[in-house]
């Protein structure tokens, strides 16, 4: 596990509101404790790793705490009082949010696109299965609320749609 992955994990845990997270792999043990403003991280590594020994972090979507969605920059910023007029497209499952069917394909839905019921707006990967998420409303997408390739929770808003 490299430094960038550890820093990303620390930020993820700090935003999630979890008090303590322990991660154990073959020869690396990581414990991240949060309390108020302070985040404490302990890393124990039994043997130095070479490039061939870098372990892959196992996906555990059921054990991952809730994460606040980070907004994606849009062409026109949406004001808070205007959000009341919009309908949210929410995640029906826990998993990883993807805006594209594959890395080399275009996004399903972009800000300004018009969607109708049963239009595919994204996919969510859960336990190695890619689930197509369809819009349940008609309208124009005003804002994408989640960054690509980030974890989402059940019921978490993904898009804002202007139904008018």
Image: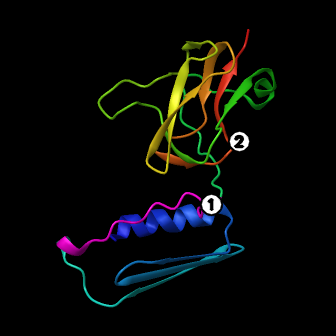
Residue at position x 68%, y 72% in the image: 37
Residue at position x 53%, y 33% in the image: 73
Q: Position of residue 50 (x, y in %)?
A: 19, 77
Q: Position of residue 62 (x, y in %)?
A: 60, 59
Q: Position of residue 72 (x, y in %)?
A: 54, 36
Figure quadrant of residue 11: bottom right
Majority secondary structure of magenta residues: loop
Magenta segment: does it hold 4?
A: no
Q: Residues within 10 Å of mark 1 (few under 14, many from 20)?
A: some
Give the secondary structure at mark 2. Answer: loop
Above or below for 145 versus 24:
above
Residue at position x 23%, y 75% in the image: 53
Figure quadrant of residue 90: top right
Taking depth in this image into account, of 130 and 153 the one nearest to the observer is 130
Q: Quadrant of the C terminus?
A: top right
CB contact under 8 Å: marks 2 and 1: no
Q: Which residue is mark 1?
A: 15
Magenta segment: does it hold 55?
A: yes
Q: Residues within 10 Å of mark 2 (few under 14, many from 20)?
A: few
Give the extent of the magenta segment: 52-65
- Horizontally, residue 62 falls left or right of residue 43, namely right
Q: Which mark is residue 161?
A: none
Q: Which residue is mark 2?
A: 155
Above or below for 124 versus 115:
below
Q: Quadrant of the N terminus?
A: bottom left
Q: CA distance from mark 2 to mark 1?
A: 18 Å
- Identify the mark nearer the N-term, 2 or 1: 1
Above or below for 149 versus 67:
above
Residue at position x 33%, y 91% in the image: 46
Give the secondary structure at mark 1. Answer: helix
Q: Seen from this angle, which residue lies furthest bottom?
A: 46
């Amino acid at each position: 596990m490299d430094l960038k992955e550890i820093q990303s994990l620390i930020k993820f845990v700090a935003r999630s509101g979890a008090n303590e997270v322990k991660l154990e792999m073959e020869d690396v043990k990581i414990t991240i404790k949060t309390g108020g403003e302070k985040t404490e991280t302990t890393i124990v590594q039994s043997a130095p790793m070479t490039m061939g020994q870098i372990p892959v972090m196992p996906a555990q979507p059921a054990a991952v705490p809730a994460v606040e969605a980070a907004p994606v920059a849009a062409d026109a910023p949406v004001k808070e009082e205007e959000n009341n007029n919009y309908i949210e497209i929410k995640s029906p499952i826990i998993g990883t949010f993807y805006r594209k069917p594959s890395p080399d394909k275009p996004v399903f839905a972009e800000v300004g696109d018009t969607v109708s019921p049963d239009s595919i707006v994204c996919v969510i990967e859960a336990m190695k299965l890619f689930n197509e998420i369809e819009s349940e409303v008609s309208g124009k997408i005003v804002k994408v609320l989640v960054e690509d390739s980030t974890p989402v929770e059940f019921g978490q808003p993904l898009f804002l749609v202007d139904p008018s």
